[in-house]
Amino acid sequence: MLRPETPESLKLAQTLLRDGALVAFATETVYGLGADATKGEAVAGIYAAKGRPSFNPLIAHFADAQSAFAVVQADERAARLAAAFWPGPLTLVLRRAAYCPIASLAGAGLPTQAVRVPQVSDGFRSVLRAFPGGIVAPSANPSGKLSPTTAQHVQAGLGEAVDLIIDGGPCAAGLESAVVDLSGPQPKLLRHGALAQADIEGVMGQKLALDVDPAVKASPGQMVQHYAPSKPLFLNASTAMADQAALVFSDSNGFEQACALEVLSPSGSDVEAAARLFSALHRLDASSARAIVVGKMPVGGLGAAIVDRLRRAAAGRGE
Ligand code: TXA
Ligand code: MG
């Protein structure tokens, strides 16, 4: 059921979540498939709807940092990052509090829990406030498929498996949150995301250890092939043939032959490119092309996260 965001649909969302149902909602990164974090059965419903391997742990979303830090053991580093970036596209992995109310299935049985305070509408923040134990939400796509940045993507990918989809418009960042592990002495970046590594390091006054090599399962369950379109995808192309669709950063020179073309940011902005990445891939995947070729992407700023997502999309298919 797809509904525009209104006081009525928000009220329905709250009732459904309370009853253990699944509600998809917009955040600044991507759409999330939400369930009451404290209800094990509701959490199991998320894994079932996504077809997700059950060892992959979920992020719990909160209205504010105070609620988030009530369920985990937050330290001074966590407080500093929260003050700088929440609400925003940063997820913190911390040790669970002694009396963490979150269903252990949501954390895949780990001693840690991922928490985040997202940028959401004022209306949906009130819904979050009604769940002090958190709303767990993975990206609202079938496991291994492209992440959804519009309510229509969610409807097309998960359809009837979701009890309610609240249409909050397209996501501003369009790329998942950066995941930082603070459960040990050495802070680690587990997933590049819509917040640049350098910005996180700037606030921490410290380098992050990188644990994001796509060849290793760093973030538990973070599989190499993820964010996959259904067509083969090839990276680092400099030309396209007539039966290929092309995805380029800002310069489409050499890609004139492509039967479909998406320019991520004509002005060359990494932030704009990140915001448009998944919707552009969705459109190219829906085109008549046989394959998708991808031009060179930027290396600075959000470039690392963009390239990470594209490498996963191409995994197992050569570059
Ligand atoms: O932007 C986002 O983060 C979106 C929106 C909906 O908030 N959510 C999202 O969730 O991308 P998901 O489930 O698709 O990705 C969660 C990532 C996975 O890579 C998972 O392995 C990692 O966070 N993660 C979650 N809990 C963890 C934990 N306890 N330890 C290590 N990694 C964890
Ligand atoms: Mg995901």
Image (cartoon, rainbow, N blue to C red):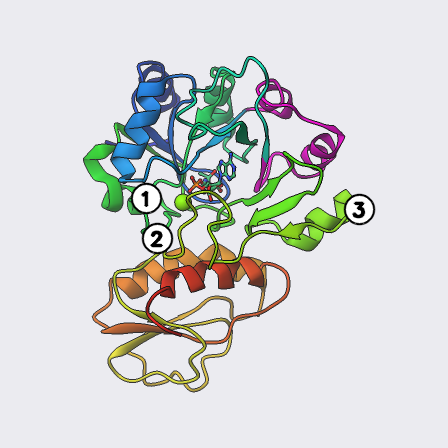
Query: Which residue, given by chain and number where applicable, does mark 2 sit on?
Result: 146
**Which disc, if any, is residue 304?**
none
| Res 262 → quadrant | bottom left
Query: Which residue, given by chain and number where applicable, does mark 1 sit on?
Result: 141
Disc 1 CB within 8 Å of nearest ligand 2 atom: yes
Residue in view at x 47 percent, y 15 percent = 130
Say above or below: 257 vs 63: below
Pointers 3 and 1 in contact (CB under 8 A)?
A: no
Check disc 3: other Cα within 10 Å, few if <14, some if 14-19, many if 20+: few
Say above or below: 104 vs 292: above
Pointers 2 and 1 in contact (CB under 8 A)?
A: yes
Question: In the shown orientation, is residue 116 left or right of residue 161?
Answer: right
Element on which disc 3 rests: loop
Which is more toward the observer, 205 or 4?
205
| Res 204 → quadrant | top right
- The quadrant where ligand 2 appears is top left
Check disc 1: other Cα within 10 Å, few if <14, some if 14-19, many if 20+: many
Instruction: Give the label, 3 or 1, closer to the camera.
Output: 3
Extent of the magenta region: 63-92
Residue 85 included in the magenta stretch of the image: yes
Residue 135 spot, x, y in % from top left: 44, 25
Query: Which residue, given by chain and number where applicable, does mark 3 sit on?
Result: 205
Task: Name the amino acid type tagged 1.
Answer: Asn
Q: CA distance from mark 3 to mark 1?
A: 35 Å
Say above or below: 207 vs 288: above
